[in-house]
C-alpha cells in the first residue's frame, strides 16, 4: 500500500482521496506501482488547478459576462465535486467560492458603472434637448441649423437609456428640430416672396430709369432720378441672380443721363464764365459815371451800358450777386441824383419852402420884439420863457433856409 497527504492506494489497487468528509474512491490502478497510480491521479488534480486558474484570470482581466462566468464556475465545481483526482479538493472548492464572490462583486461594479453611465447619458441628452429647444426659437438660421446637426451626431454617440426615458427625450429633441425647420422654411418662403416683390419693383424702376436716360430736361429729370434711387433702396434686395443685372440697367441709365448733363453743364459753365468777364467790364464802365456831375449825360450813358448788360447771358450763380450789386449801386447813385435835381427844380416844392421860411421868419421877429418889451418892463421870467421858444423857432427857421438853398443850388 502507498499513500501521500491527500490520497492512498490499497492492496487491491483502489485509489482514495482524502476530504474533510472522509475518504472517497476516485479509481483503481492495476497497471503499475502505487506511486505511479498516485502520480496519475495527482496530474488530474493539477489539471483542475490549471482550469480554475485560467478562469480566475479571465474573470480578473477580461469583460467576461457574469452569467458566463457563473456557468463556467458551476461546470468546474461539478468537476471538482466528482473529480477522480488526488489533491486538496477542498482548497479548489474554496477558490471557486471566492471566485463566485469576485464575479458577484464585478457584477455589482458593472451595475453601478452602467447606472452611472446611464445617469450621465441621461444628463447629456437632457442638455442636448434643452439646447435644441432653445435653438428652435433662434433666427440665426445657418449657425443654428449647423449646431442642431452637430447635436444629432452627439446624440447618436450616447448610450441608450431605458426605452420610456429615451423615447420621451428623443420626442422633445425631434420636436425642437422640426419646429426650427418649420420656422426656417416659413422664413425663407417669406424672404423669397419679398425678394420677388423687390424684383418686380426694381424691374419697374429700371424701365423708368432707361426711359429717362436721353432726357434733356435736366433739373426735373435729375430730381426724378433721386426719387427713383430712394425707391430702389427702400425696395430691398431681389434674388441674387436678378439683383446685379437690374442694378446694372438702372445705374447704366443714370450714367448716360448724368454724363450728357455733365457735358452740357460744362459748356454752360464755360459760357457763363465768359459772360461774367463781359459783365464785370460793363460794371467797371458804369462805375466811372459816379459821382454824377452831369445827370443827363450819366443817365444816357448808363442806359446804353444797361442795354448791353441785358444782352449778355447768364453768369455763374455764385458770382451773380456781386456783379449785379455793382450795377445796382451805380443805378441807385443816378436815381439819387435825379431825386435831388427834382427837388431843386420843383416850383411847388420851392414855393412851399419859401412860404415856410417866411412864416418862421415872421415868428422869430415877433418873438424878438416880445422879448425886448418884456425886458423893458422888467418881466424877467417871461423874457426867459420867450427866449426858449425863440430858440426852437430859430432852429426850424435854419432848417427851412437850408432846404430853400437846395432849390437855388
Image: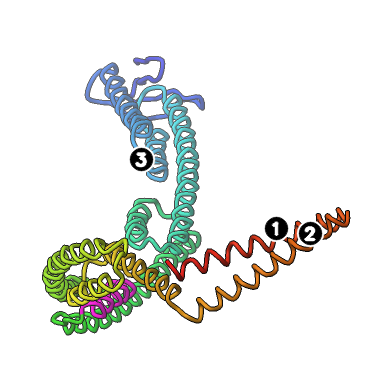
Q: Is residue 223 left or right of residue 126?
A: left
Q: Nearer the viewer, residue 120 or 201?
A: 201
Left or right side of 243 for 171: right
Q: Tell me what residue is drawn at x 47 percent, y 64 percent.
A: 172
**Where residue 330 sits: x, y (%)?**
31, 66
- Closer to viewer: mark 3 or mark 1: 1
| Residue 199 seen anywhere in this rendered image of the structure | no
Residue at 40%, 65% (x, y): give it: 177
Q: Is residue 209 above or below residue 67?
A: below
Check disc 3 and report the residue beneath it: 64
Task: Quarter of the image for the N terminus: give it.
Answer: top left
| Placement of 208 over or under 56, stated as above or below | below
Q: Which residue is mark 1?
A: 391
Q: Nearer the viewer, residue 76 or 9?
A: 76
Gap in angstroms between the C-alphas marked 1 and 2: 12 Å
- Of badges 2 and 3, nearer the viewer stands 2
Q: Is residue 228 magenta?
A: yes
Residue highlighted by disc 2: 371
Which mark is first along the chain, 1 or 3?
3
Of the 4 image quadrants, the one containing the C terminus is bottom left
Q: Are marks 2 and 3 in contact (CB under 8 Å)?
A: no
Seen as rendered, the residue at the extreme front is 376
Amino acid at each position: 500500500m502507498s499513500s501521500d497527504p491527500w490520497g492512498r492506494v490499497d492492496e487491491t489497487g483502489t485509489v482514495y482521496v482524502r476530504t474533510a468528509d472522509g475518504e472517497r474512491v476516485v479509481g483503481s490502478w492495476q497497471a503499475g506501482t502505487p506511486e505511479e497510480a498516485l502520480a496519475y491521479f495527482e496530474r488530474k488534480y493539477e489539471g483542475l488547478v490549471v482550469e480554475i486558474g485560467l478562469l480566475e484570470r479571465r474573470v480578473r482581466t477580461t469583460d467576461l459576462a457574469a452569467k458566463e462566468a457563473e456557468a463556467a464556475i458551476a461546470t468546474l465545481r461539478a468537476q471538482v465535486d466528482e473529480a477522480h483526482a488526488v489533491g486538496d479538493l477542498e482548497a479548489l472548492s474554496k477558490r471557486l467560492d471566492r471566485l463566485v464572490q469576485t464575479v458577484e462583486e464585478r457584477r455589482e461594479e458593472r451595475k453601478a458603472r452602467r447606472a452611472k453611465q446611464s445617469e450621465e447619458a441621461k444628463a447629456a441628452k437632457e442638455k442636448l434637448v434643452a439646447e435644441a429647444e432653445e435653438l428652435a426659437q433662434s433666427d440665426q438660421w445657418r449657425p443654428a441649423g449647423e449646431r442642431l446637426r452637430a447635436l444629432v451626431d452627439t446624440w447618436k454617440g450616447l448610450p441608450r437609456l431605458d426605452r420610456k426615458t429615451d423615447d420621451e427625450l428623443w420626442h422633445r429633441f425631434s420636436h425642437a428640430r422640426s419646429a426650427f425647420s418649420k420656422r426656417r422654411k416659413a422664413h425663407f418662403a417669406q424672404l423669397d416672396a419679398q425678394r420677388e416683390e423687390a424684383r418686380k419693383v426694381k424691374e419697374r424702376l429700371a424701365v423708368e430709369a432707361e426711359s429717362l436716360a436721353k432726357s434733356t430736361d435736366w433739373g426735373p429729370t435729375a430730381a426724378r432720378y433721386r426719387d427713383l434711387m430712394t425707391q430702389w433702396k427702400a425696395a430691398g434686395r431681389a434674388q441674387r441672380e436678378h439683383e446685379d443685372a437690374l442694378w446694372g440697367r438702372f445705374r447704366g441709365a443714370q450714367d448716360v443721363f448724368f454724363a450728357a448733363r455733365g457735358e452740357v453743364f460744362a459748356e454752360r459753365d464755360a459760357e457763363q464764365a465768359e459772360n461774367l468777364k463781359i459783365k464785370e467790364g460793363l460794371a467797371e464802365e458804369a462805375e466811372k459815371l459816379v459821382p454824377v456831375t452831369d445827370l443827363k449825360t450819366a443817365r444816357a450813358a448808363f442806359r446804353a451800358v444797361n442795354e448791353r448788360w441785358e444782352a449778355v447771358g447768364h453768369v455763374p450763380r455764385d458770382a451773380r450777386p456781386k456783379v449785379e450789386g455793382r450795377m445796382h449801386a451805380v443805378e441807385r447813385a443816378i436815381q439819387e441824383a435825379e431825386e435831388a435835381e427834382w427837388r431843386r427844380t420843383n416850383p411847388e416844392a420851392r414855393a412851399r419852402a419859401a412860404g415856410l421860411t417866411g412864416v418862421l421868419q415872421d415868428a422869430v421877429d415877433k418873438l424878438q420884439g416880445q422879448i425886448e418889451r418884456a425886458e423893458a418892463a422888467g418881466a424877467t421870467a417871461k423874457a426867459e420863457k420867450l427866449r426858449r421858444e425863440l430858440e426852437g423857432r430859430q432852429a426850424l427857421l435854419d432848417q427851412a433856409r437850408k432846404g430853400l438853398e437846395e432849390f437855388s443850388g
